[in-house]
Image: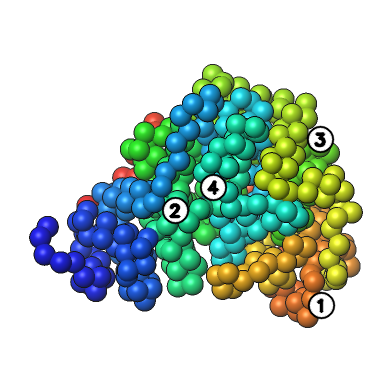
Amino acid sequence: MSGPLHAVDLIRKKRDGEELHGDEIRFLVEGAARETIPEEQLSAWLMAVFLRGLTLGELDTLTTAMRYSGEVLDHTGLGRRTVDKHSTGGVGDKTSFLVAPIVAAAGLADPMISGRALGHTGGTLDKLESIPGYRTQLSPAEMRRVLEQCGASIVGQTKNLVPADRKLYSLRDRTATVENPYLICASIMSKKLAAGLDGLVIDVKTGSGAFLREEKDAQYLAALMVETGERAGTRTVSVLTDMSQPLGRMAGNWVEIEESMELLRGERDPLSEDLREVSLILAGWMIYLGDAARSAEAGRSMAEEKLVDGSALQIFRSMVEAQGGDVQALDAGAAFHKPRFRREFRATRSGYFVSADCTKIGWAVQRLGAGRERAGEPVEAHAGIEMHVKLGAKVDAGQPLVTLFAEDEARFAEPEQLLTEALVVGDAPVAAPPLVREIISADNKNKFLKARQRP
C-alpha cells in the first residue's frame, strides 16, 4: 500500500470489523516495539482486536511481525534439539520447574522464556526470583552457556527479544484485554518462535481458573497455536489440561518452588499427584517432539525415569546455580519458608468439597502479595497459599481448607472473603474433572479451527 499510515485509522478499521493488511499490522507492531505509537492508541487497537478478533492471515502476520521485532535466538551447534513448553496461565501451575530439567535429562535442551504474573495467574519469573540471587535476565550469550552446561535455562525476555510483545503484554494486563485467543496466541507464539525451537508443547488451561473458561474457547486457542507453530516450521502440540482447582497444593512464589523441589527429590504428597502427572505428560510430548522417543507415551515413561532417578533434580540445581541462585535455599526446603504471618481458612460446615472458583483463588493469592496490580510492582517471596483438600474430598466443620501466607497481616481480609466465595462445600461428593481434556495436533487442528474461523 502507498501513503503514510496512521494508528487512528487502523484502530477505526479494526473497530469496524475490517481486515488489516500486512503492512498495517507491521506498522502497529513496529510502533509498539519502538514506542513510536502512544500507549492509548495501542490500547484502543488491542480493545478493537479483543472485540472484533483476527483472521488467520492477520494472526499469522501479527505473530511473525512480533517474533522478528527484535533479535531471535540461534541454537546452531548446541548439539541438542530444542523443545519447550508454555502454559496459558493457571493457579499453582509450576510444571516449568519439572519439565525443563526432565527434558534436559533426556538429552534435549529447553531454552525457556517465561513471563511475570498476569491477572490472577502467577509468574514463573516471580517464583524463580524467590530463590535468592537467581537471575532471570541473561544475555543470549549467557543463556547459551547455561544451556551448554545444564541443558535448561529459564529466563525472561531480554530488552531486544520480542520487544513488541513486552509492550503489548503490559498493556493487555492493564486494559482488560487478556482473555482473547488471538492476542494470547500472538503473545505466546511470538516469544516461543523467537526462541528457535524444534518442538513446542502448549499447555492450554480450561476450567474456572483459566483465562478462557469455556472448553470450546480453549480448544480454539489450542488449535490456533498449533496452526501458528506449524506454519512457522515448529512441531507443535496443544494439551488441554484442567484448571478447575489449583494444580498441586501450593500457589504463590517460594511455596511453588518448594513443592516442585519435593517432587524432584522423589517425595510424593497425595495433593501433588495431579502436578506430577501433568508434568510427566507434558514432558513426554516434549521428548517425543524432540525426537528422543518414538511416541508421547514412550516419552512419558522416559520422563518418569529421569524424575525418579534424580537426574532431573541435579539439572534443576545446576541451572539455579548457573544463573546465580542460592542452592542452599533449595536444600533448606520448607525451613526457608518463613512468612511473617499465617492464617487458617476453615470449613464452616461438614460435607464434601464440590467446587472451586479457581480465578477467585488466584486473586486471593495475588492480593496476599504474590502478584501485582501494576507493572513493575514488587512481589513478596513468601506470599501464597497451601490447599489442604482436592475436589471431591470429605471435610468436617472447622477443618482447615487453606493456609494463607503473607508478610502483612492486613492483607488477609480480602483473600479470606474471596475464598469464602470461591470454595463450596456441599452435601454429595463429586468426581474431579480429568486432568487432560484433549490433545490437539497438526492432524486434528482443522476440526477446531473450522468451527469459528473468520472469513
Number of the front mark, 3 or 4: 4
Residue 184 place in picture, x, y as percent: 44, 55
Residue 139: mark: 4
The quarter of the picture where residue 280 lies is: top right
Is residue 259 visible in the rendered image? The answer is no
Residue 266: mark: 3
Upstream in sequence: badge 1 or badge 3:
3
**Which of 281 and 142 lies nearest the eye of the viewer?**
142
Separation (CA) of disc 3 from disc 4 = 33 Å
Number of the front mark, 3 or 2: 2
Task: Classify mark 1: helix, strand or loop.
Answer: helix
Q: Is residue 45 above or below residue 308?
A: below
Q: Which residue is mark 2?
A: 160
Which amino acid, mark 3? Gly
Q: Residues within 10 Å of mark 1 (few under 14, many from 20)?
A: few
Colouring scheme, one of rainbow, by chain, secondary structure, one colour? rainbow
Which amino acid, mark 4? Ser
- 53 vs 3, left or right, is right
Task: Classify mark 3: helix, strand or loop.
Answer: loop
Which amino acid, mark 2? Asn
Q: Which residue is mark 1?
A: 409
**Which of 219 and 442 lies nearest the eye of the viewer?**
442
Residue sitting at 32 percent across and 51 percent down? 65
Asked whether disc 1 touches disc 4, contact meaning CB atoms under 8 Å apart, the reply is no
